[in-house]
Image (cartoon, rainbow, N blue to C red):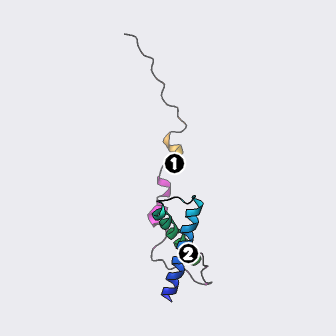
Amino acid sequence: MAQHEDDQNEQRVREHAYRLWEEEGRPEGQAAAHWEKARELAAIEQNQSTTTRPRPAGTRAKRSQPVEPLEALENQGDFPGLADQGEESRPPKRRARQKP
């Protein structure tokens, strides 16, 4: 079974590499770049079906810790915003040069 999946994956990579090569006008010396991009595209295709699969109803994600640490929520108001950084104040005027 694993050999069959490997063969299918290799075929997808070949098809992607060929398509990329043709789309770029069949340039010479770009095989390594096309194969690398093709492997990446095949991996994205392969993983997309499993990452977009919905979670079965009634199941929850197991988390040992909250998504954000509690300190971040407790200190949320302690950090300055843009209004605290002098956005409404004007910069000091430049002094006129004195002639020697």
Check the image and report above or below for 9 versus 76: below
| Of the pair 77 and 20, the residue shown nearer to us | 20
Label 1 residue SS: loop
Where's the C terminus, which quadrant?
top left
Label 1 neighbour load within 10 Å: few <14, some 14-19, many 20+: few
| Percent of width and height locating residue 88 | 55, 37
Give the magenta part as a residue range.
52-80
Counting from the top left corner in percent of width and height, residue 91 is at 49, 31
Which labelled disc corresponds to residue 81? 1
Residue 67 is a magenta residue? yes
Residue at position x 49%, y 59% from top?
28
> Which one is nearer the viewer's eye here, 92 or 6?
6
Q: Does the stretch in magenta take in 69?
A: yes
For the view shown, which residue lies furthest in the top direction?
100
Q: Is residue 98 left or right of residue 55?
A: left
Q: Which residue is mark 2?
A: 12
Q: CA distance from mark 2 to mark 1?
A: 50 Å
Mark carried by residue 6: none
Q: Amino acid at mark 1?
A: Gly
Asked if the residue at tag 1 contacts the one at tag 2, i.e. Cβ–Cβ closer than 8 Å, the answer is: no
Q: Could you say where residue 52 lies in the image, as x and y percent from the top left?
A: 60, 75
**In x, y percent, where is residue 98?**
41, 13
Residue located 50% across and 44% down the image = 84
Question: Residue most toward the bottom?
Answer: 1
